Amino acid sequence: MPESLRTLRRRLRALDDLPQLRELGRLRELGRLDQVLESLGRIETRQLEGLRGPLERHEFRVSSHAGEDGIIQFLVANVRITRRAFVEFGVEDYREANTRFLLLQNHWSGLVMDADPANIEKIYSDPVYWNTDLQTRAAFVTRENVNDLLADAGMTGEIGLLSVDVDGNDYWIFDAIDVITPAVAVVEYNHRFGPTRSVTIPYDPRFVRRRTDSSWLVCGASLAAIVSAAARKGMSFVGCNSFGNNAFFVRNELVPDWMVTYTAAEGFAAGMFKESLIVAGRDVVLSPEEEQHMIAAASLVEVP
């Protein structure tokens, strides 16, 4: 082989090792994978079109964590939406989120917020930011600032969907929101608090999961507490995902006649997932009995 060709190959191999090029290659592969996942999601949406019944029958995931994409597609297809806009907070870098497929599949506009500015910077480098009508805010959301954050972003009045997942003050923030009126809402609940207790963690505007509490266990609110807050907003509870972490609501006047609504006890889904404590730098998974012992000792607030 001529020396000039050997030199050229060495230089090309050296280029392959550059971090910037490796990152470009990774992003290119992620983009291709996204396209495949979105295509599969569109196929599933068409296959489930016209199907009724419990929410779990409609589950599939493209960008969501546990079936929420399919449930949301089912709800927005069957609920009258006057403004195709959403709000979601607690999105991290928006790679995994409840509204990403809605944004791409249904071409809604939306606002996403996360407390970590580094996560928002990652969203800016995501093609989804440049190819859609998406707003972002780096903000630590509290019940004191949530309405101002929404209003400053032009999110007031009726919207199509609200998704709340902050791993902490979910009940307090959801209950405080009054500048928007969502047709559909998705709110995370803590299944470990059980199907009937209406409880939440005490309000602490600085609460951060794992940092404020020593475990993943004592955070958020029970399903009954979230259902109660939704009822005060004129929203009906229409079920949970089968994973047991998200509850879905539809505004009372928009619930189709055939759609079943539930009490918290009727619609409760227990979580099938494990959480862990960090003890001496190691992850420790508790038994269900040990989890309940810890929760029984926790300071929780009974809410109406």
Image: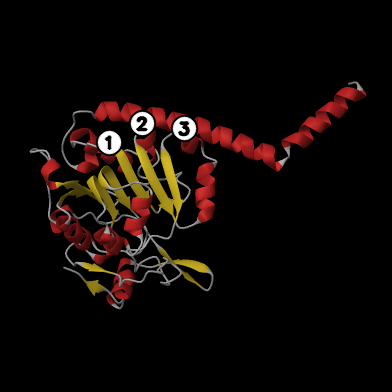
Which numbered marker is on residue 188?
none
> The C terminus appears in which quarter of the rendering?
bottom left
Q: Which residue matches tag 1?
A: 73
Residue nearest the viewer, comparing 35 with 163: 163
> The N terminus appears in which quarter of the rendering?
top right
Instruction: Check contact, mark 2 vs mark 3: CB within 8 A.
Output: no
Q: Image height check: is 113 above or below 285?
A: above
Q: CA distance from mark 2 to mark 1?
A: 9 Å
Q: Residues within 10 Å of mark 3 (few under 14, many from 20)?
A: few
Type of the residue with mark 3: Asn
The disc, 3 or 1, on the residue closer to the chain's N-terminal end is 1
Secondary structure of the residue carrying tag 3 is loop
Kindly tell me whether residue 120 is visible in this rendering: yes
Residue 20 coordinates in the image, percent (x, y): 68, 40
Residue 90 coordinates in the image, percent (x, y): 40, 54
Q: Image height check: is 294 above or below 179?
A: below
Residue depicted at x 25% and y 48%: 185
Q: Which residue matches tag 2?
A: 105
The disc, 2 or 3, on the residue closer to the chain's N-terminal end is 2
Q: Is residue 219 left or right of residue 247?
A: right
Q: How is the image coloured?
A: secondary structure
Residue depicted at x 37% and y 60%: 167
* Farthest-out residue, top: 2
